[in-house]
Amino acid sequence: MAELKTFKGGIHPPYNKELASGKAIKRCPVPAEVIIPLTQHIGAPNEPLVKQGDRVELGQIIGSSEAFVSAPVHSSVAGEVKEIAEMPNFTGAKVKSVVITADASQPEFQKKAGKDLESLTAEEIREIARNAGLVGMGGAAFPTHVKLSPPKDKPVDTVIINACECEPFLTCDHRLMLERTEDLIAGARLLKKAVEASRLIFGVEANKMDAADILRAKASGLSDISVEVLEVKYPEGAEKMLIFALTGRKVPPGKLPSEVGCLVQNVGTAVALFEAAAWGKPLYERVLTVTGPGIKEPGNLLAAIGTPISVLIDACGGLLGSPTKLVMGGPMTGWAQPGTSASVVKGTSGVVALTADVVELGEEAECVRCGKCVDACPMFLSPNYIVQAAKRGQWDKAEMWGALDCFECGCCSFSCPSYIPHVQYVRKAKAEIAALRKK
Amino acid sequence: MASAGEFAVTVSPHIRSKERVSNAMRDVLIALVPVVAVAIYYFRWDAVINILVCMATAALTEVVARSVARKKITLTDYSALVTGLFLALLLPPAANWWAGVIGTVIAVCIAKELLGGLGRNYFNPALFGRVSLILLSTWYVWIGGGGFKGSINGVSGATPLFYLKSGALGAKPSYGALFLANPGGSLSEVSVLAVLVGAAYLFYRGVISWEIPTSIIVSAFILSAILGVDPLYTILAGGLMFGAFFMATDWVTSPVSSNGKLVFGACIGILVVLIRKFSAAPEGVAYSILIMNAFVPLLDKAFKPKPFGAVAAQKAA
């Protein structure tokens, strides 16, 4: 067998996908109260369009911004606005949020007859993406319509659907590929059309051959689509790594994929674009995975944005034993939660409950210069020296060793025999370097 | 339902590999079993005493040094034991026990703990201790006791490298003997095969990578051939194999990047051949590695990996 396409560096963590990969997507009960952060994307903050006591309908827009780099937010329930307040989101940061008391009985979403998908223009697709509040649903939450508007001098010829789902444990994209194959392909073709690209590639990791097979079967008559199988390696789904693995093109440091004529979008985003274009449905709910050794019945849920973690866990049978860590997102890049009160946002790909045998809480020791972080870094940086510089407060040196090129995949810390939290030091360095530049 | 504050909150990633410094050090101890076994087989009590004295001294020295400095005792990372065992293996079987004690104290106390402990040391502690002994014994004869003065190999009898140096080629051991078992030189220099078996284990366990040993051996081989020295003899005799696989690969005192490792190893190989050929000393592995240890920070900077995409950017520009 030919060697599978991949990138250089990276790691092979235990994937533990089997916990949830066989579980069909089911709807999570709508909670009595949803907490919807008004700003869930990277970019300008939204302002509320509703006030306390207002009646809101399912899918009604409740927050937006005039700024281009932003995405509006919609209500995920029918109900009444209880309050609008600054509340901690999944990162612990305080974000203005709308708390909505949900009606006891919730309506079904009424699909609106949209335009014929084939007749949509690029501009119309961007408009649909913007109005539906689409963001990258792999975790970064960058507004989709912005990504669909590459600079005029940098035409995009290749659209890549990131179907790697390289984060351990998570299986929601896998399920979408199996259960929503046609919608996914339709959404992906809209993405391709929006940037007037000539080809569409699905990059699927080799641990999801069933998904690759069904995609190939359903796309067999479409000559512009190819389905490529990639090596199972983390972070195969990182934008730059994926572009390189599939096309051999290298996005230069500090540049965007459009620099090399590529656009990368996540599976969930493509499905959401289809729903927005075909049904007029805004992004107010998403599929996510609730899993880990600390969850009784791991599974994949379709959950309303604003659903608290506690409701997700209850929908999956509750906690099993006493997990030591609760992570929102994947275990490599997700955010550890102190409790179960944070709510689902557009970028939430899952909730993972880790137990003591999986998440060894070690003590940071001195770097022994083994070089494993350097070997693992997919960006070819020197994490050990970034940490050393950060410890000494030498921010210019931290930058020299690549702090700003780090996208915080965590391969360094995963490999480190001294249990050094490199990502923590990198974030500190990035903040300090940014502060120095402002001066 | 769960309440706030019951889960641990740390920065991602939330899963880690099982690799720990202590595991790697334990692997080194395991990898040294063949070398130790061969040494004990040929040198009997001389080897046993050397090894026990050095390992015990290393452990004791670390406990005392860290206690005095009010630091956490880190014996459980096995690094002191590794240093002690390495030093013992670098000594000739006839070495006095007190030479082992002095060398080990220097290795653990001065070369490692005084600089801040494991990870902060610039020089391979065991090699530093070994070379200190050689230098000290030229001034204080009682240390060497006539055993190993003036020779890195430090052997009272003729070593394989002595034959090479003196040109008494008729009496030199065969390649086969060097490879399998030739009890001359220090405890670690008896059998290349024993070294390779241990090294294979370290490769398998991911403790060492191919760059440093390969570049040392290849560069030494090539330069020997150029200078008219028997190249196969160069790499099989003396401490070259042991140094290449076990000493130069020390994490702390070798470069972190792949290219840095290659240059580091190549320079060691070249220095070994030059020292053996042009200096008064018959052996040069220890000196070569220590010299290159000093250049590690420079090599790391000079051979810093280019960030992903940076090369392409230059070409495009």
Image (cartoon, helix red, strand yellow):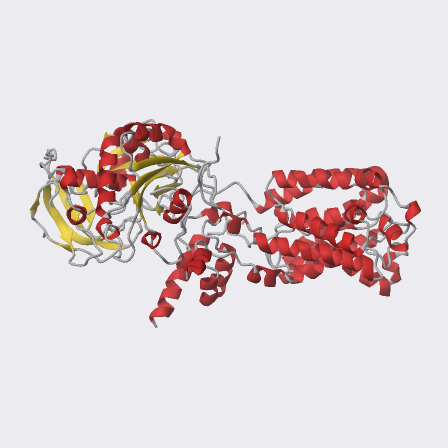
> As rendered, which of A356 and B250 lies closer to the eye?
B250
Q: Is residue B216 visible?
A: yes
Provide residue A99's location: percent of width, then percent of height: 16, 47
Q: From the viewer's perspective, is residue A223 above or below residue B140?
A: above
**Is A360 on the left or on the right of A184, as rendered?**
right
Judged left or right of residue B172, residue A73 is: left
Q: Quadrant of the C terminus of chain B?
A: bottom left
Up the image or down, A227 lies above or below B239; here it is: above
In x, y percent, where is residue A115?
11, 39
| Residue at the image point whose x is 30% and y is 35% from the top | A172
Q: Residue furthest bottom?
A: A439
Camera-nearest residue between A389 and B179: B179
Is A250 on the left-hand or right-hand side of A135?
right
Does residue B56 show up? no
Q: Which of the two residues, B29 or A81, is positioned nearer the viewer here? A: B29
Q: Residue at x 74, y 46 (%)?
A: B241
Q: Position of residue A32 (x, y in %)?
A: 16, 38
Q: Quadrant of the N terminus of chain B?
A: top left
Figure label count: 0
Residue A345: x %, y % from top left: 24, 45
Left or right: A190 in relation to B314? left
